[in-house]
């Protein structure tokens, strides 16, 4: 399956700052990537679908101005958490869609907002 | 319609036992059912997946059983090992939309 990396793996920031998380497809050209959020001991919640060269599609209840997604190339999608607050602290995971329904996930990014 | 219900939330087995995790869905448009394994602090890893045209699929020690009429599917871990201790998620998607709908997860602990 596709190999996916994320950077950084962990980030701590102050409230009010913005944080950018990168998701890279290392061995596969991904027209579609997905961004998820996961709270401790909970399931994955889809935030948005990132489409190369076009605007991301956000799930209901996800603020698009808060979570900016850019998918400028077939191997890179970025998620920027703008004006982060403590409630944005979470585990953010991206995935690459390959062959239709199959998704391969990155290792995740732990965000802590102080 | 989009929900996937997973049970149990957690289970403990002895080494060599067979943990069984069950999932049920409502949306008949779902036609792809993967299982993911997640270790603490890591991203989910695809274990095995099945489509409704087969009733069972095996990959190594992992087996999926699928009951289309009941809209249920389950994961069996044969000869479980302590290294299998993880959280397991079932999911479902349809060809019409490529988004995955996840179950709530099951924390499995395999005791030595």
Image: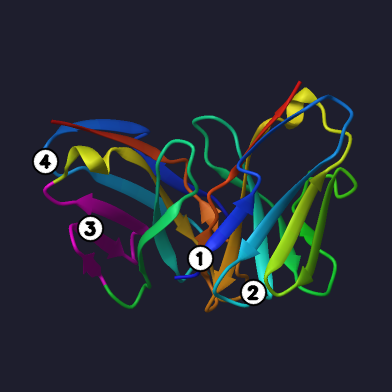
Residue drawn where x is 32% and y is 47% of the image? B22
Q: In this view, does B64 lie above or below B81?
A: below
Q: From the image, tell me which residue sits under label 4.
A: B17
Q: Mark 1 points at which residue?
A: A3
Residue that mark 3 sits on: B62
Does label 2 lie on the same chain as label 3? no
Considering the numbered disc 2 on the image, is that residue within a helix, a strand or a loop? loop
Q: How far apart are marks 4 and 3 (CA)?
A: 13 Å
Foreground: A8 or A59?
A8
Q: How crowded is mark 1: few (under 14 residues within 10 Å), some or many (20 or more)?
A: some
Q: Position of residue B12 (x, y in %)?
A: 22, 30
Residues in magenta, as a range? B55-79
Do the numbered discs 4 and 2 sit on residues whose CB atoms are within 8 Å?
Answer: no
Q: Residue at 81% of width from left, 61% of height from top?
A: A70
Q: Residues within 10 Å of mark 2 (few under 14, many from 20)?
A: many
Locate the C terminus of chain A and report the quarter of the image it occupies: top right
């Amino acid at each position: 399956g596709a190999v996916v990396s994320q950077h950084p793996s962990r980030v701590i920031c102050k409230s009010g700052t913005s944080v950018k998380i990168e998701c890279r497809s290392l061995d596969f050209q991904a027209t579609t990537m997905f961004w998820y959020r996961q709270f401790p001991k909970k399931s994955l919640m889809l935030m948005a679908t990132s489409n190369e060269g076009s605007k991301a599609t956000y799930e209901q209840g996800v603020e698009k101005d808060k979570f900016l997604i850019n998918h400028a190339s077939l191997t890179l999608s970025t998620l920027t958490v703008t004006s982060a607050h403590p409630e944005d602290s979470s585990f953010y995971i991206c995935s690459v869609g390959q062959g239709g329904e199959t998704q391969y996930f990155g290792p995740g990014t732990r965000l802590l907002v102080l | 319609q989009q929900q996937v219900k997973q049970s149990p939330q957690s289970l403990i087995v002895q080494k060599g036992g067979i943990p069984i995790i069950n999932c049920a869905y409502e949306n008949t448009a779902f036609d792809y059912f993967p299982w993911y394994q997640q270790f603490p602090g890591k991203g989910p890893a695809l274990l095995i997946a099945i489509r409704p045209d087969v009733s069972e699929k095996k990959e190594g020690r992992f087996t999926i059983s699928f009951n289309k009429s009941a809209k249920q599917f389950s994961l069996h871990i044969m000869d479980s090992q302590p290294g299998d201790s993880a959280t397991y998620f079932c999911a479902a998607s349809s060809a019409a939309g490529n988004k995955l709908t996840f179950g709530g997860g099951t924390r499995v602990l395999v005791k030595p």
